Amino acid sequence: MSERKPIESWLTDMDGVLIHEGVPIPGADRFLKRLRESGKPFLVLTNNSIYTPRDLHARLQRMGLDVPVDNIWTSALATAKFLSDQRPGGTAYVIGEAGLTTALHDIGYILTDTAPDYVVLGETRTYSFEALTKAIRLINAGARFIATNPDETGPSAEGALPATGSVAALITKATGREPYFVGKPNPLMMRAGLNAIGAHSESSAMIGDRMDTDVLAGLEAGMETFLVLTGLTDPEEVERYPFRPSTVVESIADMVDRV
């Protein structure tokens, strides 16, 4: 087996790697500082489609983490890029927040509930029965079904919240139509991100806290993968998967000297 090329660019997940329930993980600030000083291309990724990159930049900055807007890549941006490539200047009925609607506006999409090309499902804290009913009827009438990410739950201080994957399952049950998920573990999100920063998979690495999304997507995109144990995966769980990360570390603090 040939040796991998030196790592020249980095992709890292946000929740569980850099922050946990709104609090920076020790070492995250030093890791980001080292990345910026290195001059190597990097992206901070999130499957959450609620916020725009500008929103996330401000939220991270308030926590003491400096991530430039251009270094943030969300499932909403990846979804917009996918739709722009597939059907430029199309139309969509959207269930989601500003992160998704802004991304679609920026590619010239028209948001409508009248015979749209796509129904696009993203993350929101206010899923409504009326909006879901409309989505189901539009899909039954021929709209193509897209979802930003397959995550079934999301974290909160009070416990798990239903997320895009769970709501997509409801729509699928009602329509018999499976969505195309753009976000992790779809390697499309990683490859589009790498293209955005001019990076190549054979000399790139992905850092994440989940085997089923971060590590799997990095692996399928051809990148070196690092799993941190500060999020949703414990060491025993790693052994249950048929694939492995390249390296397992305790936290992002252990990655500072690898940049």
Image: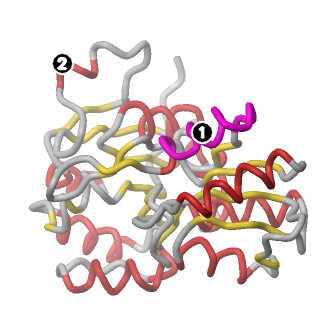
- Amino acid carrying label 2: it is Glu
Does the magenta-highlighted stretch encompass residue 172? Answer: yes
Left of 164 or right of it: where is 238? Answer: left
In the foreground, 235 or 158 = 158
Residue 139 image point, x, y percent: 80, 49
Q: Residue at x 81, y 81 (%)?
A: 108
Q: Residue at x 18, y 29 (%)?
A: 234
In the foreground, 249 or 238 = 238
Image quadrant in which you'd find residue 32: bottom left
Residue 249 image point, x, y percent: 19, 38
Q: Which residue is mark 2?
A: 236
Image quadrant in which you'd find residue 19: bottom left
Which segment is the magenta one? 165-178
Left of 55 or right of it: where is 30? Answer: left
Vertical comparison of 66 with 206: above or below: below
Which mark, residue 221?
1
- Are dots 2 and 1 in contact, CB under 8 Å? no
Q: Residue at x 87, y 57 (%)?
A: 86
